[in-house]
C-alpha cells in the first residue's frame, strides 16, 4: 500500500518560523516540532546589534565641521538574512531525511523571496504553494481555515502557486 505524501506547512517571518502538518484525518494542523525556530536578535534595533557608534569625519571644506558616517551595512537586515539562511538549511536537512514530500511556505513577501533564493534545488522541488502573508501569530485552527484549499489530498502533483491570501 502506498503511503500518503507528507505535507509540511512552514509559517515564517524574518525572526520566527513554525512547522505544521495536517492531522491524519485532515481536519486540523498539528505542530511537528517541539519548538519553533526563533532568532531574537532579528527583532532588535540596529543600534543594539552593533556596539560602536558610527565613525565621524571632518568635512572636506576645512570648516571644522564633523559629520557622522553611515555604517556600511544594515545590521538588522543582516540578522534577518542569517535567520532565513538558517531556515533554508533546516528545510534542506529535513528534505534530505525525507521528512516531507510537499512543502507549503507562508511568509511575508520579502522573506519569501529570500527563502526562495536560498532553498537548495531538492527542497525547492517539494514546494507546492507559496503564500505571501505574515501569519506567524495565527493559531493552528486559523491557519487550517486559511490554508484548507492547499491541504486537500491529491495536491502532490500541483504546480507551485504563489498567492496573497484574502483576509
Image (cartoon, helix red, strand yellow):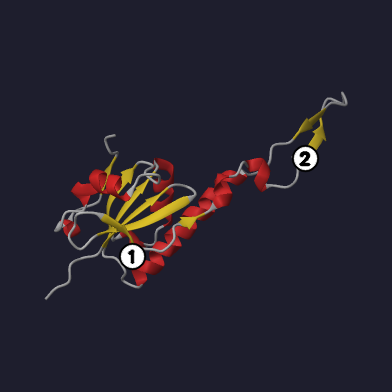
Q: Residue at x 14, y 58 (%)?
A: 154
Residue 102 lies in quadrant:
bottom left
Location of residue 27 in the rendering, given as x and y in whole percent from the top left corner: 19, 54
Helix, strand or loop status at disc 2: loop
Q: Is residue 28 visible?
A: yes
Q: Residue at (40%, 58%) from the top-left corner?
A: 119
In the visual, does 113 lie left or right of 40? left
Residue situated in front as seen by the camera: 19 or 24 = 24
Quadrant of the snapshot with the N terminus: bottom left
The vertical placement of 88 against 93, above or below, is: above
Identify the image quadrant of residue 22. Answer: bottom left
> Would residue 34 be found to the left or right of residue 142 on screen?
right
Residue designated by label 1? 122
Which residue lies under the disc numbered 2?
Answer: 55
Farthest residue to the left: give it.
Answer: 1
Circle on res. 100: none
Other residues around mark 2 within 10 Å, as few (<14) / some (14–19) / many (≥20) = few
What x and y, as percent, mark residue 9? 31, 55
43 or 23, nearer to the observer: 23
In this rendering, the answer to whether 75 lies above or below 22 is above
Instruction: Give the x, y percent position of residue 133.
Output: 35, 41
Residue 24: image quadrant is: bottom left
Dot 1 falls on a residue whose secondary structure is helix
Q: Residues within 10 Å of mark 1 (few under 14, many from 20)?
A: few
Estimate the x, y position of residue 33 in percent, counting from the top left: 39, 63
Q: Relative to 81, is 102 on the left or the right?
A: left
Amino acid at each position: 500500500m502506498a503511503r500518503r505524501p507528507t505535507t509540511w506547512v512552514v509559517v515564517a517571518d524574518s525572526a520566527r518560523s513554525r512547522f505544521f502538518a495536517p492531522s491524519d484525518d485532515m481536519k486540523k494542523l498539528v505542530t511537528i516540532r517541539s519548538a519553533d525556530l526563533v532568532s531574537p536578535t532579528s527583532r532588535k534595533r540596529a543600534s543594539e546589534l552593533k556596539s560602536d557608534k558610527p565613525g565621524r569625519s571632518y568635512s572636506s571644506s576645512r570648516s571644522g565641521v564633523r559629520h557622522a558616517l553611515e555604517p556600511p551595512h544594515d545590521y538588522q537586515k543582516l540578522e534577518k538574512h542569517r535567520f532565513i539562511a538558517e531556515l533554508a538549511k533546516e528545510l534542506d536537512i529535513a528534505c534530505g531525511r525525507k521528512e516531507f514530500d510537499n512543502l507549503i511556505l507562508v511568509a511575508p513577501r520579502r522573506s519569501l523571496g529570500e527563502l526562495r533564493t536560498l532553498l537548495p534545488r531538492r527542497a525547492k522541488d517539494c514546494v507546492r504553494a507559496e503564500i505571501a502573508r505574515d501569519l506567524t501569530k495565527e493559531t493552528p485552527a486559523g491557519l487550517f481555515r486559511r490554508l484548507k484549499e492547499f491541504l486537500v489530498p491529491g495536491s502532490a502533483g500541483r504546480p507551485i502557486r504563489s498567492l496573497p491570501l484574502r483576509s
